[in-house]
């Protein structure tokens, strides 16, 4: 019976690896591209290559341990091995080895990822093309642009909901907030994922390299309507973005100014 179990366990790494292999995004295997969403961010490849390094490391360990598990089940089946079992009380050398190897691996990852972290979380752009405030609330994304004067909390602030317009090839600086609970600002195609924490203003930045409409979703289970908390990011040319902003300003102006009180 144990022989069957060992085969079953052996199938885990085999099927797992095969599934990753066929679904990976590659020119030579265009069958099932369930891998990363298309990268349209300037630093996206940094995140992706870091992901691949960690996937290779954990993948090798996964396959090695699963194969070892299956092999031991196969080799040391009780019915076959009539020899008396020898008990041991641990091995000091082995303990040292399997403590040092993971510790060294983690230290390697910690040092290796420093540049990626700095790029995405530390080196805030000095002169962003657009600043926008994004506030997560149950269950939508509230967006605010500073208007002409470039600062928030002034009468020319512009408001939008769920569709984040940004110009392509410019640094975008998002000031991320939450109005109620934990949310998570997730732009899969831009490799941006950041928790929105009540009481905090967290800077997030990216630079889009292509125009198009992509997902903006909440990646934190934030309540019953979490699934509804999805929007879009619309990446467009500078001209289109300015035109949209002007139109938004026009609409907002009409909405707040009573007829006959048009400012000159
Ligand atoms: Cu949410």
Image (cartoon, rainbow, N blue to C red):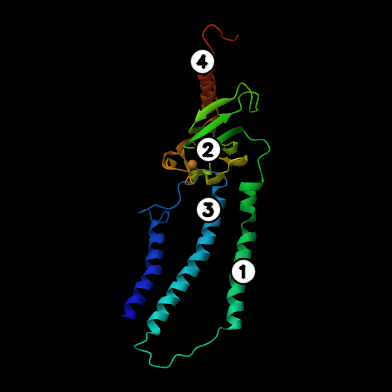
**Which residue position is annotated with label 1?**
103
Q: CA distance from mark 3 to mark 4?
A: 45 Å
Q: Earlier in the sequence, mark 3 or mark 1?
A: 3
Q: Secondary structure at mark 2?
A: strand
Number of labelled discs?
A: 4
Dot in front, 3 or 1 = 1
**Which residue position is annotated with label 4?**
254
Foreground: 234 or 28?
234
**Which residue position is annotated with label 3?**
48
Compared to residue 84, the image places residue 97 above or below, namely above
Q: Earlier in the sequence, mark 3 or mark 2?
A: 3
Q: Earlier in the sequence, mark 2 or mark 4?
A: 2
In which quadrant of the rendered view does residue 129 lie? top right
Q: Residue at x 51, y 58 (%)?
A: 52
Packing grade of label 2 (10 A; few <14, some 14-19, many >=20) is: many
Q: Residue furthest right?
A: 126
Dot in front, 3 or 4 = 4
Dot in front, 1 or 2 = 2
Q: CA distance from mark 1 to mark 2?
A: 38 Å
């Amino acid at each position: 019976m144990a022989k069957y179990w060992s085969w079953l366990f052996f199938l885990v790494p085999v099927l797992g690896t095969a599934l990753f292999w066929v679904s990976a995004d590659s020119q030579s295997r265009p069958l099932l591209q369930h891998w990363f969403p298309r990268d349209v961010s300037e630093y996206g490849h940094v995140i992706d290559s870091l992901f691949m390094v960690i996937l290779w490391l954990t993948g090798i360990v996964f396959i090695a341990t699963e194969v070892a598990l299956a092999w031991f089940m196969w080799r040391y089946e009780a019915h076959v091995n009539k020899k008396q079992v020898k008990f041991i009380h641990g091995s000091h050398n082995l303990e040292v080895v399997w403590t040092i190897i993971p510790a060294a691996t983690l230290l390697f990852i910690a040092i290796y990822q420093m540049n990626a972290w700095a790029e995405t979380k530390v080196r805030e752009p000095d002169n962003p093309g657009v600043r926008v405030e994004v506030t997560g609330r149950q269950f939508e994304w509230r967006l605010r642009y500073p208007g002409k004067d470039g600062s928030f909390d002034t009468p020319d602030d512009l408001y939008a909901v769920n569709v984040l317009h940004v110009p392509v090839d410019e640094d975008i600086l998002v000031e991320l907030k939450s109005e109620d609970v934990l949310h998570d600002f997730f732009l899969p195609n831009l490799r941006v994922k950041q928790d929105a924490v009540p009481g905090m203003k967290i800077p997030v930045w990216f630079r889009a390299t292509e125009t198009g409409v992509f997902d903006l979703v909440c990646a934190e289970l934030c309540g019953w309507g979490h699934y509804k908390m999805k929007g879009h990011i619309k990446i467009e040319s500078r001209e289109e973005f300015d035109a949209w902003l002007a139109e938004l300003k026009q609409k907002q102006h009409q909405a707040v100014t009573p007829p006959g009180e048009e400012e000159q």
